[in-house]
Image: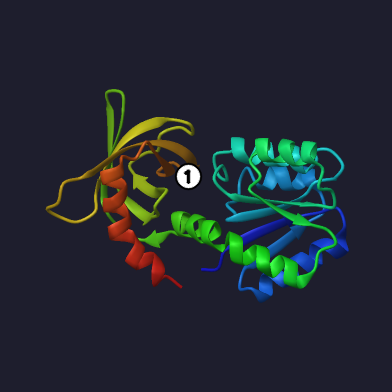
């Protein structure tokens, strides 16, 4: 699965040029001219990188970056700021908002390709973290004194889609016990219910996964992620 990238720029020509170059680099790029529409989309849809124009009608690129970092879905997404200005005060604001890279205008193919080479490591880590592998594992979820037994429908390094007799409400914090392989100790982690599908499916996002548990999950999933289409 290629990295998903969203480009947000109120200049259609600049945005389409960036998308075209990203696609030639093997990425799945989409484009929006409205920062308001982009901010709403980024609350729901996962992207592995976001390119934001600094100067847009409100909310500007810095404010959208802040919203991305505060979101549940894209808090760790790689953010690139597109700007024609190298003023220290503006760059400081952008860094404080969570921007990691800058692309300075005018945008040129060789300049963007160099940036992609620098940013591809963080983008690839983000892609792997959220790549879902279809997998059925036994799982139990506990919230207070309540306990649900279920089965994962898919699993990633960041969370899982779980089918159970019923779903906990959105925003519920749970303790997860996940049986990766029969006969092995369950992987335990905190998690947050970040979406519900119908009455019996819920998407959970792992929280406070310890180092040892994180290594176990990576050792189990990474070989499957690397061979996923």
Secondary structure found at label 1? loop
Rendering coords of residue 82 (x, y %) = 77, 53
Q: How many numbered discs, if any?
A: 1
Residue 225 vs residue 110: left or right? left
* Dot 1 alpha-carbon crowd within 10 angstroms: few under 14, some 14 to 19, many 20 or more: few
- Residue at the farthest bottom position: 24
Asked whether 99 or 219 is in front, the reply is: 99
Asked whether 153 or 210 is in front, the reply is: 210
Residue 42 vs residue 141: left or right? right
The image's colouring method is: rainbow
Rendering coords of residue 161 (x, y %) = 41, 50
Rendering coords of residue 219 (x, y %) = 28, 59
Residue underneath mark 1: 198
In the image, residue 106 above or below residue 23: above
In the image, residue 43 above or below residue 136: above
- Residue at the farthest left position: 183
Q: Residue at x 45, y 32 (%)?
A: 169
Residue 1 vs residue 6: left or right? left
- Residue at the farthest top position: 145
Rendering coords of residue 29 (x, y %) = 68, 65
- Asked which quadrant contains residue 72, the reply is top right
Asked whether 138 or 2 is in front, the reply is: 2
Q: Residue at x 31, y 40 (%)?
A: 210
Residue 161 vs residue 70: left or right? left
Q: Is residue 135 visible?
A: no
Q: Residue at x 84, y 38 (%)?
A: 58
Q: Is residue 113 visible?
A: yes
- Asked which quadrant contains residue 103, the reply is bottom right
């Amino acid at each position: 699965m290629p990295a998903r990238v969203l480009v947000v720029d109120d200049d259609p020509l600049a945005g389409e040029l960036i998308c075209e170059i990203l696609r030639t680099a093997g990425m799945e790029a989409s484009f929006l001219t409205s920062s308001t529409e982009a901010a709403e989309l980024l609350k729901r849809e996962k992207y592995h990188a976001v390119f934001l124009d600094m100067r847009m009608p409100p909310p500007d690129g810095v404010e959208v970056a802040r919203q991305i970092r505060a979101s549940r879905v894209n808090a760790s997404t790689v953010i690139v700021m597109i700007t024609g200005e190298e003023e220290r005060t503006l760059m400081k604001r952008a860094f404080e908002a969570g921007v990691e890279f800058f692309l300075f205008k005018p945008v040129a193919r060789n300049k963007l390709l160099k940036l992609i080479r620098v940013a591809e490591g963080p983008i690839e880590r983000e892609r792997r973290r959220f790549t879902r592998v279809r997998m059925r594992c036994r799982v139990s979820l506990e919230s207070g004194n309540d306990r649900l037994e279920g089965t994962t429908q898919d699993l990633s390094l960041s969370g899982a889609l779980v089918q159970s007799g019923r779903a906990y409400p959105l925003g519920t914090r749970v303790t997860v016990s996940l049986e990766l392989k029969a006969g092995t100790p369950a992987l335990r982690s905190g998690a947050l219910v970040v979406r519900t599908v119908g009455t019996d499916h819920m998407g959970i996002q792992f929280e406070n996964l310890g180092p040892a548990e994180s290594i176990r999950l990576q050792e189990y999933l990474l070989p499957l992620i690397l061979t996923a289409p």
